[in-house]
Amino acid sequence: MFAFLSPLRKALRPAVLGLSALGLSACDVNLAPSLGGGPAIDPSQPIPVALLVPKSDGGAAPVAAALENAARLAIAEQGAQIDLRVYDTAGRPELGSAQAQKAVDDGARIILGPLFGEVANAAGLAVADEGVNVLGFSNNASIAGGNVFILGPTFANTAQRLMAHAKRQGKSRILIVHSNDVPGQFGKSAIEQAAKTHGVQVVGAQPYALSVEGVSAAAQAAGQVVQSGAADTVFITTDATNAAMPMLLRQLPENGVTSAQVQFVGLTRWDVRPDLFELPGAEGAWFALPEKARQDSFNQRYAAAYGTAPHPLAGLAYDGIAAIAALAKQGRGDALSTRGLTSSSFTGTGGVFRLMNDGTNRRALAVATVRNKQMVILDPAPSSLSSAGF
């Protein structure tokens, strides 16, 4: 699903980054203490918000610009008084740490960003002793906690949504097909946890090496499991933009893993690559995505304001400002504390979301399928989320 940080930074240089590629280095560990507070604010005055983005990182500079644009669009649309101050991290942890401290010294009451996980981790550590919360743009749950929250969509959230749907549809025996790298392991773990939550059995996990031979061997092995009758569902963790995905959707059916026998489920958004819908394994498959109407509306408003389509990550900055604005408009002095940030749901560019006490997030997702090579929504995104998620 998501490339972790080093691949992300590389991916930003040659091409536009897909929605799922938000994650960061798996070795990032958030050591910030768990602080229940956060600086008090005067809701009647403009709230100083620091936006930390990699403006001078050549490959990430366009993303930084899009994030800033989206944040300013949110300020204009949300109707709250926000004093946005932008700081350049250059995509480096040491500079992210220094800029976070400078932002707080300048009066920032909350930090939005940074983009990269290890930079967000460093920023959080720098200001943890002052109780300032950080809303990072990562989707890597390993950096969440303490005073660091992540805004990016997570494997765990998607897996829980899809597993709940599978359970309701009578699915009970899951085979996981995943790459044998860090993203694949994270995806596998998320699916296993979701299966445990919903009382669904994982009958096996088939890893594959990132090569033609590796994918072919995995497809053959998965075929043997399915032909034995052990599985009624095949859950694929692979990112839709990864070269392995079309190979899997061709070779799995060639090895007897067909939609007539099992339910295909994708952990990532297949709609970002509609050409996949033409492949044999795609017909009838399930995947999850945000509320499309809201996302399309944001894209249109952004394009009208800035004359170009938003980067796929831009909406995360809009969401962060939307949450801050919503809390500020409640008139509460503790709006930016951990208590305030986790007190309610917010409406963002892809629908409803909320920040959790462990620093992760829950996002309302729709479940879609492929019918006659077209995406069809099976189960719309919910309009509200409980504190426990779905």
Image: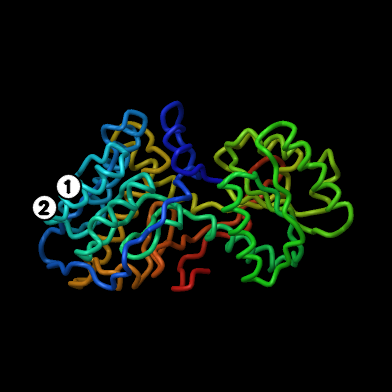
Could you tell me residue 321's position as x and y percent?
28, 55
Residue 38's quadrant in the figure? bottom left
For marks 1 and 2, give the CA distance. Answer: 9 Å
Could you tell me residue 213's position as x and y percent?
75, 32
Q: Of all residues shown, which one is farthest toward the right?
A: 228
Please, what secondary structure does the residue beneath circle 1 have? strand
Q: Is residue 258 visible?
A: no
What amino acid type should be assigned to the residue bearing mark 1? Arg
Please, what secondary structure does the residue beneath circle 2 have? loop
Foreground: disc 1 or disc 2: 2
The residue under the point 72% across, 54% down is 205
Q: Is residue 149 above or below residue 94?
A: below
The residue under the point 76% across, 63% down is 173
The numbered disc on residue 106 is 2
Q: Is residue 97 above or below residue 55?
A: below
What amino acid type should be assigned to the residue bearing mark 2? Asp
Label 2: how many residues lie within 10 Å, few (<14), some (14-19) or many (20+)? few
Q: Is residue 384 above or below residue 235?
A: below
- Name the residue nearer the viewer: 92 or 57: 92
- Name the residue nearer the viewer: 280 or 38: 38
Q: Is residue 342 visible?
A: yes
The numbered disc on residue 85 is 1
Do the residues under discs 1 and 2 have CB atoms within 8 angstroms?
yes
Label 1: how many residues lie within 10 Å, few (<14), some (14-19) or many (20+)? some
The numbered disc on residue 328 is none
Could you tell me residue 194's position as x and y percent?
61, 65
Left/right placement of residue 319 relative to residue 96 reads: right
The residue under the point 36% across, 71% down is 344
